[in-house]
Image (tube, grey):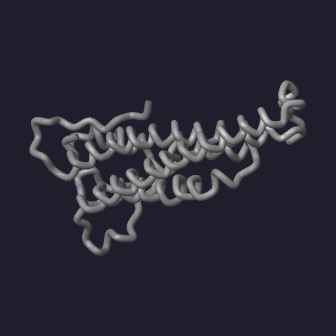
Amino acid sequence: VPFQLYVFMSSPRNSLTVFGELHERWEQVSDRGYNQLNNVVNAHLKIMFSDEGHDGYRWDVLSDCIQARDDITSSLHTQMMDSYKHCCDSYAELRRIVDKMRANVVVPNQLQQQHSTPLHPLPHNDHPSLLHHLVCMFEDQLERVHKPIIERVLSVQDRDALTLMLSAWSLQPCIDEKFIEQLAYHPDTKI
């Protein structure tokens, strides 16, 4: 389970508190999206491998029963498309969460293009910079990872590529959980 950002509820409601709540919601929706994506990939793989001789795999038991295989494939396709729709719904909800994060951040114009790097970290007490950096991480995850997965998962015909898509969704490579954890326990942020 990814680290969740906790806030002290005794402090007044501020941008960091709102971000903490939205981060927790992101994790829930992302987990739900991952489960649906996993269902899509599993059904997709079963359909791919139901074709006799596809990549050396066969459903030997069904090789003589074409109608049964076709019925199973049709059922799997329906399951896959239902799960895909739910996965797209999760993506849309993640987009709304990021939009709420963005709306919660008032950033001076000079910060619009600023990103921190390991050599030039953002100061912990500069809340607009911190929030801008956090929102950028979630936007990058959504646009660079989740969106391409949604756009391509149904057309990919390679088991390894599908597995990589699942891993990328789950591991969230654009989101620096360690940074969020450090922020959560830093005294200047009061999170």
Q: Is residue 172 or residue 42 the one in the foreground?
A: 42
The residue at 11%/40% (across/down) is 11
Relative side of 47 to 40, left or right: right
Residue lying furthest front: 67
Relative side of 58 to 37, left or right: right
Q: Is residue 85 or residue 107 the one in the foreground?
A: 85
Residue 63 at x, y percent in the picture:
88, 31
Q: Does residue 55 appear anywhere in the picture?
A: no
Residue 23 at x, y percent in the picture:
33, 44
The residue at 71%/52% (across/down) is 156
The residue at 19%/42% (across/down) is 190
- Which of the 4 image quadrants contains residue 74? top right
- Which of the 4 image quadrants contains residue 106? bottom left
Total number of numbered discs in the rendering: 0
Residue 128 at x, y percent in the picture:
25, 60
Q: Does residue 3 appear anywhere in the picture?
A: yes
Residue 89 at x, y percent in the picture:
44, 50
The residue at 34%/40% (across/down) is 182
Q: Is residue 127 or residue 34 the one in the foreground?
A: 34
- Which of the 4 image quadrants contains residue 155? bottom right
Relative side of 61 to 26, left or right: right
Image quadrant holding the N terminus, namely: top left
Residue lying furthest bottom: 109
Image quadrant holding the C terminus, namely: top left
